[in-house]
Image: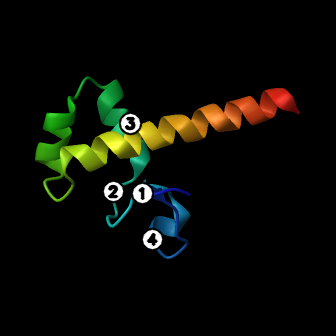
Amino acid sequence: MGKYVVSDPDILGGTPVVKGTRVPIGRILFLLKDGYTLAAIQEDYPHIDVKTLSAAIDEAIETLNATAHAKKVL
């Protein structure tokens, strides 16, 4: 998928996760939606630094935007 978000059928059945972890990017986005800050999320997942969390979120947004744009073109 990308540099910070990956999908592997052997990890959580292919659910997109933060690279090098078993933490679904969907969980990170849910926590953001629920009002968590990046620092608070990093406290819950101390093995993922804030820079990586931020980059994974940006990558997820870029992927969603590219997918939405591709559907408009079709």
Crowdedness near tag 3: few (<14), some (14–19) or many (≥20) residues, C-alpha within 10 Å: some
Query: In this rendering, would 8 be left or right of 25?
Result: right
- Which amino acid type is marked by label 3? Leu
Q: Secondary structure at mark 2?
A: loop
In this rendering, position of residue 9 left or right of residue 45: right
The residue at which mark 1 appears reads as 17
Between the residue at mark 2 and the residue at mark 1, the CA separation in whole angstroms equals: 5 Å
Circles 1, 4 touching at the beta carbon (< 8 Å): yes
Residue under label 3: 29
State the image quarter where residue 21 is shown.
bottom left
Nearer the N terminus, badge 3 or badge 4?
4
Q: Measured from the top left, where is residue 1 in percent x and y?
A: 56, 57
**Amino acid identity at mark 4:** Ile
Q: CA distance from mark 4 to mark 2?
A: 10 Å
Callout 2–callout 1 Cβ contact below 8 Å: yes
Residue 45: image x %, image y %?
A: 18, 52
Q: CA distance from mark 3 to mark 2?
A: 11 Å
Where is mark 4, residue-wise? 11
* Residue 23 numbered tag: 2
Instruction: Write the residue at 84% across / 30% down.
Output: 73
Task: Give how far apart the Cα atoms at labels 1 and 4 are.
Answer: 8 Å
- Please give the name of the residue rendered at 14% of the width and 36% of the height, measured from the top-left corner: 39
